[in-house]
Structure formats: structure tokens, C-alpha cells
Amino acid sequence: MTAAAEQRTTTATPMTQEQTLDSLGRYEYGWADSDFAGASAKRGLSEAVVRDISAKKSEPAWMLESRLKALRLFDKKPMPTWGSDLSGIDFDNIKYFVRSTEKQAASWEDLPQDIKNTYDKLGIPEAEKARLVSGVAAQYESEVVYHKINEELEKQGVIFLDTDTALREHPELFEEYYGSVIPHGDNKFSALNGATWSGGSFIYVPKGVHVEIPLQAYFRINTENMGQFERTLIIVDEGAYVHYVEGCTAPIYSSDSLHSAVVEIIVKKGGRCRYTTIQNWSNNVYNLVTKRAKAEEGATMEWIDGNIGSKVTMKYPAVFLMGEHAKGEVLSIAFAGEGQHQDAGAKMVHMAPHTSSTIISKSVARGGGRTSYRGLVQVNKRAHHSKSTVKCDALLVDQISRSDTYPYVDIREDDVAMGHEATVSKVSDDQLFYLMSRGLTEDEAMAMIVRGFVEPIARELPMEYALELNRLIELQMEGAVG
Amino acid sequence: MATLEIKDLHVSVATEDGPKEILKGVDLTVKAGETHAIMGPNGSGKSTLSYAVAGHPKYEVTSGTITLDGEDVLAMSVDERARAGLFLAMQYPVEVPGVSMSNFLRTAATAVRGEAPKLRTWVKEVKQQMGELEIDPAFSERSVNEGFSGGEKKRHEILQLALLQPKIAILDETDSGLDVDALRVVSDGVNRYKASGETGVLLITHYTRILRHITPDFVHVFAGGRIVESGGAELADVLENEGYVKYAAIQEATTAS
């Protein structure tokens, strides 16, 4: 039993000091709620399971067909043989759909108590009350349980719904764009998502509308061996702007869960989309996510991707630069502690002239953890005058951790400017000595060095996420130095 | 009144050929209100003494004692020494990218004082000290020592001295690489720190010119890993005229061994 679960069940006997300290451990979202919905859910994947998911949602026939096609592709596709070790995933033991509540709540008070407690602990109602967000969605298990959008935005025609509702309420828009950026057959996990998807966010921003305050979503897995397969689809129309932020957590269980999302984004002419993720899954979640955007003429797509939790992450946000002067940017930050492998990076595909891309990746490995930067920059024929800059820096906190860099470059046009820079550094004895000679403990000194290292990315985060990141770094660095 | 006492200190560093002894029996006592200058040729072990007192892991104390007000300094970690009231202004201050000077200073002050300084008085305090040291306020938002010139780094070391107010300060070649104006500004900073009479200064230098700004009560000549001669301020004048030639034999005998 985990420390956090133990804390819940042994409230009658006070904990010893060791237990208390243990329960305060590194991962603070590790509690689990009681799990009636999850306990009764079926394990394993079959055509019957997929049909059942579709039927429960009363989906149109085309979606059921699409799911079944994806299932066939999933069966045919091989497991990736590169990247992280995925041999621990047991597809037969995963619960593919868990419905935790019968209907979506329109206010916090309407949420079932246990779910409300969860999001209270995550601090979400505060963010909403403080108007830090212009819309919030909360996904618990397979489905979105709470949803709200600012009325003003609604009047301007902005759509911010959970993906299931969007399929019902905006079928044409949905069918036009669904799967248009990432086909089911892209990889084994996009096929899996295509067959089993549930929940996620659907956003449409009409021409010229600027959504100034971020739209946010929070994803929470509660059931053990749960698979969360949210599907997010964002369409930013011409000249429009949106910033979407998502956070992810899960309890600590002794066996593994799977999170395999697909995120598709279309940014039309002159539009701009910024997508920020801080995933802090517990260290028993396989996080295998396919994220891709298409940027049309003069459009800008920015991925800000933070990977702190999970057991294994494989995630390479991509931008296909389809129109002239389109811009793509990925800022990626990864932490790997004991037993973690963060295989993260980016993919930039230049399809048109005068397109530009920037990839900045920072990773920190400690306690025997492993970080990999894996990136592809591809410049196709006719994408002349394209520019690309790649900079990846890795920081190793100790002698037992590992960092690798796999930069792939594929240039098929002559007139192109490419820059690539990669560094691996260690926290130097002299830096530690300098800070400690000013009174900082070794842990404090280490955390300060690490915070400084990731600062160029942290400053791009919304304030509350930047603060959260700082706190997570401090937790990660506690006792990091032996 | 604070007292730093160093007795028969032997210090080695690891080299490819095994440990090499650099300090060979140093005896020195620095009391509050006193300024000691340690002078000597390059390679005599002056900087090793400063690092050993501050606790740099590269320097291993093989025998001898260091105490601050009777407390065993050698039993303390680097940060405990700082919180006990020791300070080392470094010859080569280290860069910490991404950490702003203001954040660094406040974190250090919080650690050494044991509580976070009140924001309003703190901002005023830092501003005033930066003004005295003629540091452009824009530096507070720059990363610690990153891209600073030699002179800027040294001014910031003295800024830390002013804010942390240690009991005993060791200044390791603070004068090296400073032009005339910077030397004056930095020296004035040290003199303000000394003015209370409750703090002690151990000033390590190769040249006598800083001693024209900061008057030592004692001058020690360092050669071959220990103090070979001690005197008053007048000893500095002798060194100014005669150089270290006189001590060269000791120095060579020890480096050869």
C-alpha cells in the first residue's frame, strides 16, 4: 500500500514520525479517492469494449466506424522499438473506460464530494475564482466532469467544450477536423487513442478573436490500471489567438496506468496558439502522447511542454509548417528522478518557404533517472529560406543519472539556415561551494542551480505554473545530494 | 568578541600523483577589530588557507585545528561555517546562470540571518549598499556573476560582505584585476565593514597597493605553506621595497620537495 493511501485508511491511529515524513514525500498528489466506479470497470481491449464505449456515449455511426478502424490499426501496428522501454505495459490489464459520474456539473457544488475534494486539493476552484482562467475543464478518469467558460467569450463565438459534448453539439465542425492532423495509423498509440478516446478539450476560436486569459484543463486519473485516452482538438481561426493550459496528476499505485492522449491543433492564417502542459503524473504512469499542430500561412504555434512526473514519457510535440512565414516553437523541460525516463523532444516539418522553427529543450536528471532529447527538423523541397534553431541543454545532478541526445535533421532544400547546439553539464562543485559559502544548505544550493537552469523556460509559464514548477523542483531536490 | 583561531594547520589537495601537502603548519589568530594581511609569492598557499577555512571539498585538512569563538569549524559543513559568521570573498566568484543577483542576495541573507529580511527595509538596504559600491541597480536583475567583468564581480563580493555582516571576513586577492577607481570603491567598502570594530578581516594579497587603502594591524609573510615572518604595517613597506626575493629560498625548497 502506498504511503498516501495508508494515510487515508489509518486515520484512527496517529502516524509515527517516519510515516508522517514519508507521507510528505516527493509526490504530493499521490492520494487516491475511494473508487467505486473504477472497481467495477472491465479490463482489456476488444471490439466489444470499443462498441460499448461508443454506445454509452450514443455516438454517430461514423465515429463508431472510425473507432473500429483504429482498433484494427492498433492490433496491426508494432510497438515502437526505439525510445523508452515499454515492455511493462500490459494492454489486457488496463481499464479502458471508467465513468465516474452520470452527468457533467455546471458548478463546483454540483460535483460529487470525492471528486470535488480532489480538485479542491489541486487548487482549481481558487484559480477559477481568482479569474486566472477564462474557462476550466476538469477530466476525472475517462470523462470531463466539470466545465465552464466565461460568458463574454461564449458571446464572441468561442467554443470550449469537452470533446464528447462537442461531437454531439458541433458535428460538422468536429468531423471536418477530427483526425485531420494525426491519422489513426500514425503510430500504435494514436491508433489506441482513436479506438478508445474519451474526454479531452475541444476549442474553436473564431476569426480575429483574442482569448487573453488562458483556457485550462486538469486531468486526473484515480483508478488503478486506468487508461486515460483524452482527445483534444483545437481550431484557431484566421488571426485569432488562444492559450490553452493543462495539468495532469494521478495517485501512486503499485501497478501501472497508461495515459495516451492525442492532441490535434489547426492554426489558420495569421492565427496563434500557445499550448502549455505541465504533466506531473505519479511515477507509475506510462505517458505516451501524440501532439501535433498544423500552422498555415503566417500562423504561429507554440508548445510549452513540461514533463516532471510519470514513469515513462514519450512525447514529441510537432508543428507542420504548411504556409509561408509560418512559425513553430517548442520549449520543453524535463525532470527525471529515480526510475523515470523522460524521452521528450520536438518535431518541426517545414513544408513552405520562409518558415521558421525553434526548439529549446532543457532537461535535469537525478537519482539515476534518464532524460533523452529526441528531435527531428525536416525541411522539405520548396521550403527555401527556412530557418531552424535547436538548442538542447541537459543537466546531470549526480554521477548515476543519464542523458542522451538524438537530434535528427533531414534537409531537402539548399537555401536553409540551420543552427544546432547541445550541451550536457554537471552541477559543479565550485557552484555548490559558492552558494553554500553564502549560507545555503546543499539541497537549497542544488535547487537554486536547477531553478536557474530551467529559468529561460519557467518564465514563459503562467505565473501559478511557474510557482508550482519552483516548488516541484525543491521537492525533487530534497535529499538529491548524498 | 569574535576570534578565529588556526593552529598548526596542514592541508593537502588531491593531484594525479596522490595527495600533495600545501599548508605545512599554519598558526594564526584573528580577533574582532583586527585586520591581518597575508602576503606572499604566488604558489605559497595563501588561497589554500582561505579555501580550507571556508571548507571547499577539494582541500583536505590532514591535521591541526580551526575554531571560531571556540567552536570547531572543521566539524561544520560549508553552509554552517557561513551561518556561524565566516565569509570568504572569492578571487574567482562563480557564475550561476538563471539566478538573479537579487534572488541570490535575499536567499543568502535569509540563510545567514536565520529569517527572511523584511521586504521594505531589505530593498532599501540593498539599494543603499549598491549605491555605496557604485553598482548599477540594473545588476540586481542579472544572473549571478554571469558576464560580469572582474571588477564587477569583486564589487558584488563586497556587496555580499556588507549585507551578510560576518564576524570574520577573508578577502582572497580582492584587489587582483581592479583598476584604481574600483580598488578605492572596494577598499572603502571593506573599511565600512571594519568600522564597527566588532569584525575581523583576513586580507590575502600579492601586492601592497590595497594596503594603502586598508591599513593592516598585522602583516604576515607566507612562503612554502606557512607564515615565515610577522610584523606590523611597516612590514608591508619593506616588502614593497625588497619584494619576496628574501623568501624565495624557502619557497623553492618546499615546492621542490
Image (cartoon, helix red, strand yellow):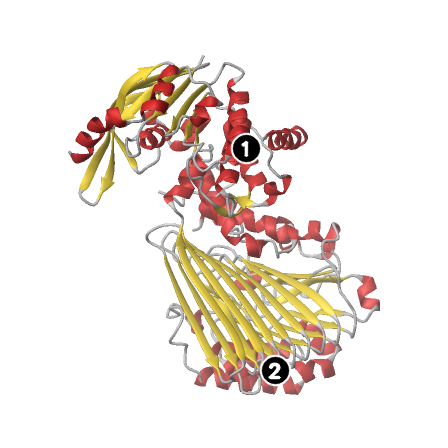
**Which structural element holds mark 2?**
loop
Q: Is residue B80 left or right of residue A240?
A: left
Name above or below for residue B56 compared with residue A453: above
Q: In the rendered image, which quarter is residue A87 located in?
A: bottom left
From the viewer's perspective, is the residue at label 1 or at label 2 nearer? 1
Are there few (<14), some (14-19), or many (20+) residues within 10 Å of tag 1? few
**Circle 2 marks a residue in which chain?**
A
Give the distance between the C-alpha atoms of the residues marked 1 and 2, in whole angstroms: 55 Å
Horizontal and vertical percent for residue A89?
41, 69
Residue drawn at point x = 34 percent, y = 25 percent: B39
Residue A353 — which label?
2
State the residue lying farthest toward the left: B257
Q: Is residue A235 left or right of residue B141?
A: right
The kind of residue tagged 1 is: Asp
The front one of A471 and A170 is A471
Residue drawn at point x = 29 percent, y = 31 percent: B45
Horizontal and vertical percent for residue A465?
61, 53
The front one of B49 and A340 is B49
Q: In the rendered image, which quarter is residue A218 located in?
A: bottom right
The front one of B209 and A421 is B209
Horizontal and vertical percent for residue A258?
48, 67
Residue at the disc numbered 1: B181
Residue B102 — which label?
none
Horizontal and vertical percent for residue A24?
49, 42
Work out whether residue B86 can be spotted: no
